Amino acid sequence: MTTQKLVSEIKRKGSFLCIGLDTDISKIPSHLLQAQDPVFEFNKAIIDATHHLCVAYKPNIAFYEANGSKGWDSLQKTVRYLREQYPEIFTIADAKRGDIGNTSKMYAKAFFQDLGFDSVTVAPYMGKDSIEPFLTFNDKHTILLALTSNEGAFDFQTRLVDGKEVYKTVIEVSKGWQNSQNLMYVVGATKAEYLMEIRKIIPNNFLLVPGVGAQGGSLEEVCKYGLTEDCGLLINSSRGIIYASSDTDFARAASIKAQELQTKMAILLHDN
Ligand SMILES: O=c1ccn([C@@H]2O[C@H](COP(=O)(O)O)[C@@H](O)[C@H]2O)c(=O)[nH]1
């Protein structure tokens, strides 16, 4: 999906919500466990109940890998379902990959070609040759970890090296990579106070912002410095939406939580 199409969907829906499909088999309602693929049934119900309120879904690959080959089946079925039923939705494989060039090429093939995701998250630690194989895919987006939402972000990312924070160097250097127009960046909602500085380096790039909801990040704080003319933000919430109820009403409960965020987003977009 092109950035232009993503922006037009954000405007049409009045939403820049991304729903995280971090589907943990031990947390899904017990009545679904009789199904042949409980994880897919859960995802399908969540998607059907919330697709009109969000513009993106982000399955975190760890939750699928943890179930072995069955997990990959559930993931594949989920992405196919989204592509066939809701082709206007932007899909994010939260996989945090990156390796030497020829290995990254295989990761890119797996997530963009085989699974057909619109985007994948990657770690910048191994540098340019580990990321460029992802960037060669046109109309696909590579989402680079910049400043993550967890406490451990302070271990390396905010450290000064040659007088500059590592996360700023990551963003600045990555702007010079081939096809860097295909880059988006992860910035945690718990780090909203850093957004003013980040927007000075990348005024227009889309940011994927996890950490609203269960991690306590504030939507309003993120928007204060993160919003651009074209929105420029995808705000993710996973547990806060998909586990709103553990009973038979789980999909409706998820849609209520998603609606709460979408309503606030529509106002923020309107006032922007
Ligand atoms: O900095 C980061 C990068 C990725 N994540 C991922 O986003 C979701 C957040 O889930 P919640 O349940 O809404 O807390 C999850 O998949 C993380 O692995 C992140 O939180 N922070």
Image (cartoon, rainbow, N blue to C red):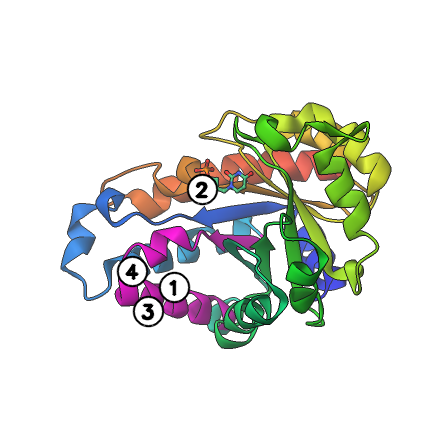
Task: Report x, y in % for residue 20.
Answer: 46, 47
Q: Secondary structure at mark 3?
A: helix
Q: Residue at x 36, y 40 (%)?
A: 253
Is residue 239 positioned above or below 33 on the image? above
Q: Which residue is mark 2?
A: 238
Give how far apart the Cα atoms at labels 3 and 4 are: 12 Å
Q: Tell me which segment is drawn in magenta.
A: 55-83
SS assignment at label 1: helix
Q: Are marks 3 and 1 in contact (CB under 8 Å)?
A: yes
Q: Tell me where residue 201 sits by quadrant.
A: top right
Mark 3 highlights which residue? Answer: 73
Instruction: Report how far apart the C-alphas of labels 3 and 2 lie in the structure.
Output: 21 Å
**Badge 2 local density, few (<14 within 10 Å), some, or many (20+)?**
many
Residue of label 1: 75
Secondary-structure class at tag 4? helix
Q: Say whether residue 23 is left or right of residue 261.
A: left
Q: Earlier in the sequence, mark 3 or mark 2?
A: 3
Answer above or below: position of 104 versus 229. Answer: below
Circle 4 packing at 10 Å, graded few (<14), some (14-19), many (20+), is some
Amino acid residing under circle 1: Leu
Tell me if 81 is positioned left or right of 245 in this view: right
Split into 4 quadrants, where in the image is the N terminus? Answer: bottom right
Q: Which residue is mark 4?
A: 41
**Side (left or right) of 157 relative to 33:** right
Q: Amino acid at mark 4?
A: Glu
Q: Residues within 10 Å of mark 1 (few under 14, many from 20)?
A: many
Name which quarter of the figure residue 90 lies in. bottom right
Q: Is mark 2 within 8 Å of ligand 1?
A: yes
Is tag 3's residue or tag 4's residue first in the polypeptide sequence? Answer: 4
